[in-house]
Image (tube, rainbow, N blue to C red):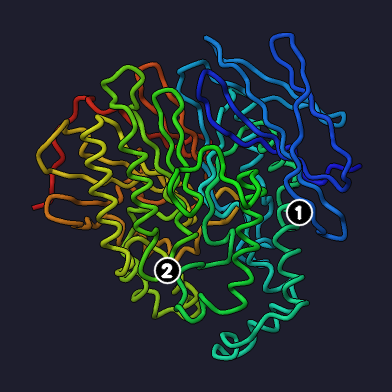
Amino acid sequence: MTIKLGPILNFRGSEGGAWKVSILVATDSSSVPAISVSGNGESRSVTAHELARFKAARDDITLWRYDCNVPQEATERTVRYGLEGGEWAFAVPAKDANPRAIYASCNGFSSLKLLKGTKVPNALWKEVNRAHEKASFHLLLMGGDQVYFDSMWEELSTLGNWVALPADERIKRTPSAAMKRQITEYYRSLYLRRWSQKEVAQAFATIPTLMIWDDHDILDGWGSYPTELQECAVYKEIFPNARESFALYQQQSRPTESHPLAIAAQDCFSFGCRIGSTAILAPDMRSERTLTQVLSPKSWKAIFDWLDALPNAAMPGGVKHLFLMSSIPVVHPDFAMLENALGIFPGYQELEDDLRDHWTSVPHRQERLRLIHRLLSFATTKNCRVTLLSGDVHVGAVGTICSERDGGDASARIINQLTSSGIVHPAPPGVVLFFLEQFAGRNMNDERGIVSELIELPGTRSHFIGARNWLSLEPDPDDRYWANWHVENEKHPFTKVIHPVGFLMPRPKMPS
């Protein structure tokens, strides 16, 4: 028996004083690998659950999940586990403590040209592992594009031939048996190839993950194509395979079952959890995406019902910080302006589906405004600081949403957005960064009394980090979170402090 992938940790919740994780392992045999878990002088084995068997990369692969519940104590503890001669460890926070977390996105390359032009593809994963060794992180939040399936158009002959057809023929074409077989094996096997890289594997084996997908986990621009293409037979063959692989690898669940943190009464992968006085919410912004919606009304209702059930920060055990993982930034330059500007440069027309992806795309603006209203209302009603975590755009940035409407604590009327992208994917070319910078400082009047904008990064005169980066979220005893962007080739991180609601601050100043 050979371990083909893993171990990979996944966070499953922290209710009842237990820190719940699962461990994913892929083997080339149906023989069950043994895992032992030890801590506080005790050692025990954990039971394996078979998730799936399939053929991938000429191997017969079996995926195994091991569920492990660790009691939380008055202080942080380290739990060690062993598998086939190897040993790893992960940190469990003290009971009722807030977690130290990492946020990252865009773990791959959208083209072979970018891959070949990057000297050290996993340089930032090395930094993550070094930082984790110095001071352990409890969670690894990944906000989308954990795997890039863009390579399938070049590596699969059937898809390469299909994409070369005229558009009307592609829409009419029915996938052949060979195409179906290639697609299925590719979605199952690419995770084995990408996630077994040494630096990525080390992080996944030592920090419990929470992952929500974005378009490249399916295919570039998924949900933002014209209806006839989005619903063509080939895409209908691709999506179920992407969905199955996402469930197995990223959520460590069978496609027919829900993750323990899944939000009830929805038809997609949105999840939420509470840890100490922190809540984490990750809406699934891909499963139901179309040109005219990001999530269905049913899914939004389920998400807002989950939010409404969270306890007020003023109550014992209340939630003081909500981190909402929006794979696409809610605050970003109006891409319609950027599209017009870039139109004078040949070679940038492939951005079109990315422009339709964004919250500021005209068909999505009303849905975006409803989200903003609900989050501002939640922050005021629950006395809870709301912070958006975003990726996708291959830059780092800080955004704010400010309301001068009356009601509640003034500090609750400010929502911060922290964008970190990408941990592997390079930043856009200089010409794109230049035009982004020209539009970044402009306020967007979302509605009377509500304004969003990108602000300058702390200690700089720039609105964007034009280099690869990852974000650490580190709580302190005063209920603050210190957000640190760790940037490639920068000696020191960019830092922003996220205060809880109630921190004394001036009333938001609105533009005249």
Residue 411, relative to residue 1: is it above or below? Answer: above
Q: Secondary structure at mark 2?
A: loop
In the figure, is residue 25 to the left or right of 496? Answer: right
Image point (22%, 41%), residue name: 377
Residue 122, relative to residue 33: is it above or below? Answer: below
Give the amino acid at mark 1: Arg
**Mark 2 residue crowding within 10 angstroms, few (<14) / some (14–19) / many (20+):** many
| Mark in front: 1 vs 2 | 2
Q: Nearer the viewer, residue 57 or 103?
A: 57
Give the label on residue 482, or none.
none
Residue 94 x %, y %:
52, 16
Give the amino acid at mark 2: Thr
Give the image quarter of residue 341. Answer: bottom left
Q: Are marks 1 and 2 in contact (CB under 8 Å)?
A: no
Image point (62%, 53%), residue name: 246
Residue 497 visible: no
Q: Nearer the viewer, residue 87 or 61?
A: 61
For label 1, the residue is: 193
For label 2, the residue is: 290
